Amino acid sequence: MKTYKKKADRNSKPIKYLNNRMEGLNKKESEEKAGYNSSNHSSRIEETKTYKEGLLKLLLPENEIAEEHNKNIKQDKDRGAKNTALNMWYKLQSKYPKEQGEMEVGDLNITIKKDTV
């Protein structure tokens, strides 16, 4: 049996809510303008598949994200941001050693010791 991927309906309430948020409206205003009755929906709206898929389409394409991430890794002005970017890269690449060990990054030799507490 074939399954077909349905495109998000631009007139659906979650997509209307997302567009309202992107225009700068607060959550309550976005809910009301999208057609929701109650003003306590925002957390549930943001968990819907339609909202998440719509949000992903608004984000940068993967190659642009990788390019920006790479710029962050190569810069030296904000060491915290650089370290966070490196940490994310290692997690994505599954390069962190599971146990005590060593790894090389460029000309750095990093020794990781597992706490014995």
Image (cartoon, rainbow, N blue to C red):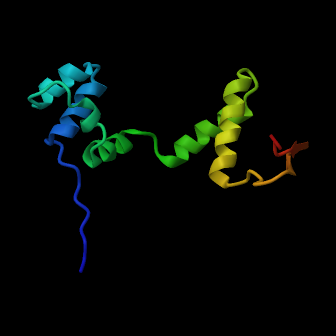
Along the viewing direction, whichever of 88 and 11 lies nearer the viewer: 88
Quarter of the figure with residue 60: top left
Task: Say which quadrant the N terminus sits in.
Answer: bottom left
Quarter of the figure with residue 16: top left
Along the viewing direction, whichever of 87 and 68 lies nearer the viewer: 87
Count of numbered badges drawn on the protein = 0
Q: Please state if 27 lies on the left or on the right of 79 as rendered.
A: left
Q: Residue at x 23, y 27 (%)?
A: 20
Quarter of the figure with residue 48: top left
- The x and y percentages for residue 39 are 16, 24
Q: Please state if 68 lies on the left or on the right of 41 as rendered.
A: right
Q: Which residue is drawn at 54% across and 41% down?
A: 65
Task: Say which quadrant the C terminus sits in.
Answer: top right
- The x and y percentages for residue 66 are 59, 44
- The x and y percentages for residue 45 are 24, 37
Q: Which residue lies furthest to the front in this view?
A: 117
Along the viewing direction, whichever of 44 and 9 lies nearer the viewer: 44
Q: Residue at x 32, y 47 (%)?
A: 53
- The x and y percentages for residue 64 are 53, 42
Along the viewing direction, whichever of 57 and 102 lies nearer the viewer: 102
